Image (cartoon, helix red, strand yellow):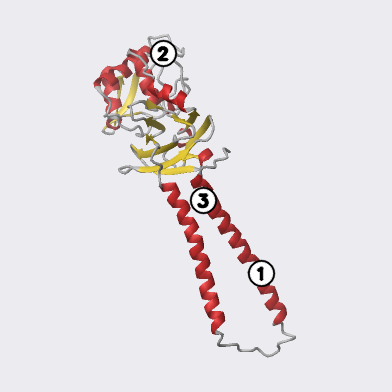
Amino acid sequence: MYPQSFSPVQQVDFALLLVFSFAGVVVLALTLITLWFIYRFRHEKNPEPTDIQGNTRLEIAWTLVPFLLVMGLFYFGWTGYKALRTVPDNALPVQVTAKMFSWTFTYQNGKHSSELVVPTDRPVLLKIRSADVIHSFFAPAFRVKMDAVPGMENYTWFKAERDGEYEIYCAEYCGTGHSVMLSKIKTMPEKDFAAWLDTKEPLKGADAGHALMEAQGCFSCHNMNGDNSMAPALPGLYGSTLTITVDGKEKQVVADERYLKESIINPGWRTIKGYDNTMPPYSDLTPEELLQILQYLKSIGKDSPAGAGGAHRGHDGHGTQ
């Protein structure tokens, strides 16, 4: 576990320590008082019950003291929560998009990545949204967890204090591919991050399509190793014959350019036999981006070396239609 120590986490830790310490003191005090009452008012010494009434000072004390203690606990809890929700002015904004079953990170200059790359010693503001169902961004190393809710934007922030790689999980069950909705946080010095962010990859054609699909998280569902358990594997998909369901009726189609293009833009209009309708639509892709993706799928089609069993630009992924 990464020993996260930036200020908001320290405040939350202190609040939790205070609550647990207070609870421990209360349990110990009540136990001792109970034992004393059992001894002091045992039957041998008090054969006749005594009715004790009218102690104003005691009544004020047991009302005022718990009130002050609870308000004190509330204060420390509130300051910790406020720190978690107060983003520093110099924070790096990153748009986080969750969709079944992948994460996409978009930076201010328009660069997309399937991994969250951030500089060390600088706060990072995560603007979190969902493209389909409820997900939850969870980075345990940084003690950060925030829901991604359709139709709204949540936010949270963190600061990495040393270089390294750390896991990202989805902490809200979102479908059959929930367990493979994984990514990484890569932290690096500010200079290296600036160089990475400014790198313009001069990719064209199939290479650009591969990079785009990787950035969109496609390989977290569509496997490149021939595993069709969650979704059709990509090698050999172009040009293959598929059994689909349209309006409740099965029919066979060839996965040509038209079919693949329509299935990317609006995958819900038809479903491949054996798979659920869980793939989100990618209607925001430009015509050029669609063309690049199609070029990549063609390059690993059934007539290509990869489609025959090779591994063109291999990527270990998982899948869903």
The mark found on residue 12 in the picture is 3
Residue 84 place in picture, x, y as percent: 44, 47
State the residue in front, 279 or 192.
192
State the residue in front, 72 or 182.
72
SS at mark 3 in the image: helix
* Label 3: how many Cα within 10 Å (few below 14, some 14–19, many 20+): many
Quadrant assignment, res 281: top left
- Looking at marks 1 and 2 on the same chain, the residue that comes earlier in the sequence is marked by 1
Quadrant assignment, res 37: bottom right
Q: Which residue is mark 1?
A: 31
- The kind of residue tagged 2 is Gly
Residue at 52%, 30% in the rendered image:
165
SS at mark 1 in the image: helix
Q: Which residue is mark 2?
A: 307
- The kind of residue tagged 1 is Thr
- Looking at marks 3 and 2 on the same chain, the residue that comes earlier in the sequence is marked by 3
State the residue in front, 281 or 50.
50
Q: CA distance from mark 1 to mark 2?
A: 72 Å
Residue 98 place in picture, x, y as percent: 38, 36
- Looking at marks 1 and 3 on the same chain, the residue that comes earlier in the sequence is marked by 3
Examine the rendering and report whether any part of residue 2 can be seen.
Answer: yes
Asked if the residue under mark 2 is in contact with the one under mark 3, i.e. CB atoms within 8 Å, the reply is no
SS at mark 2 in the image: loop
